[in-house]
Amino acid sequence: MQEKIRVLIVDDDQELCSIIERYLKNAGYEARFAHTGASGLKQALADDYHLIVLDIMLPQIDGLSILTEIRKQSVVPVLMLTAKNEEADKIRGLQLGADDYLTKPFSMAELMARIDSLVRRYTRFNRSASADEVLKLNSLSLDVQTRAVLLNGELLELTGKEFDLLYFLAAHKGQIFTKRQIYQQVWGEEYAFDDNNIMSFISKLRKKIEPDAAKPFFIQTVRGVGYRFNQEG
């Protein structure tokens, strides 16, 4: 029997959670909930989930603090919810390792589309990888099945979306992609982020994989066009 996809929703709005639960169950997901930051953090670290939907404004512990703790132990995809339509909050969440964000109020159709996209992208990478598929790129090594990335033999801690982005570019090294093309291929949907968010992901990834993030070797900027993975990688 196929394993059910488990989604943890951390939000103190219990009425909203009840609505989300109906949609998730109708879509075949297993939904679990936490209504405080403390209980959300405890559940997130105590069990394995395929996706966590995490509100920023929570009692006891805020969502960004929870995200920080999650990223110390897990690369599970995280979708942030925020009632603030402020770019700084969104960028901060992405810098801490969030894979996507959604601003309240939102439609259930949009929430489910984001959830489906993150789960589909995450599981598709795992399912499509062969047992021995490893990309060796100079000092970098990507094990596609385990989603492990080594730099000079040392394991790097990448989020799920950071791995997806790195794998996509590395698998097409030398090919130039616009920001729109990267978003459509890595996020699996029509371009929704502005350029600053794509640039934020590239910047985070460079800090983790580049010997000198100020002079990138692996992920190169093609001025006025987009990005490419170094053909020499």
Image: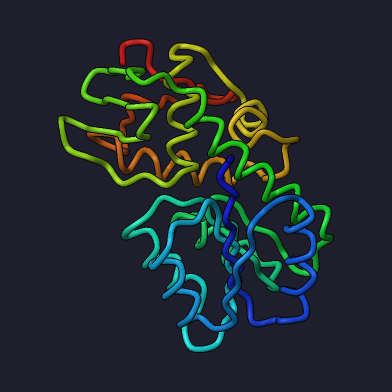
In the rendered view, does 160 fall on the left or right side of 178? Answer: left
Q: Position of residue 22 (x, y in %)?
A: 79, 64
- Coloring scheme used: rainbow
Q: Quadrant of the N terminus?
A: top right
228 to 126, vertically: above or below: above
Residue at image coords 56%, 45%: 3
Q: Quadrant of residue 68?
A: bottom left
Q: Residue furthest bottom?
A: 60
Q: Nearer the viewer, residue 230 or 138?
A: 138
In the rendered view, does 127 fall on the left or right side of 156? Answer: right
Q: Nearer the viewer, residue 90 or 145?
A: 145
In the rendered view, does 94 fall on the left or right side of 139? Answer: right
92 to 35, vertically: above or below: above
Q: Position of residue 81 (x, y in %)?
A: 65, 66
Q: Position of residue 184 (x, y in %)?
A: 67, 30
Q: Quadrant of the C terminus?
A: top left
Q: Position of residue 25 (x, y in %)?
A: 74, 58
Q: Residue furthest front?
A: 1
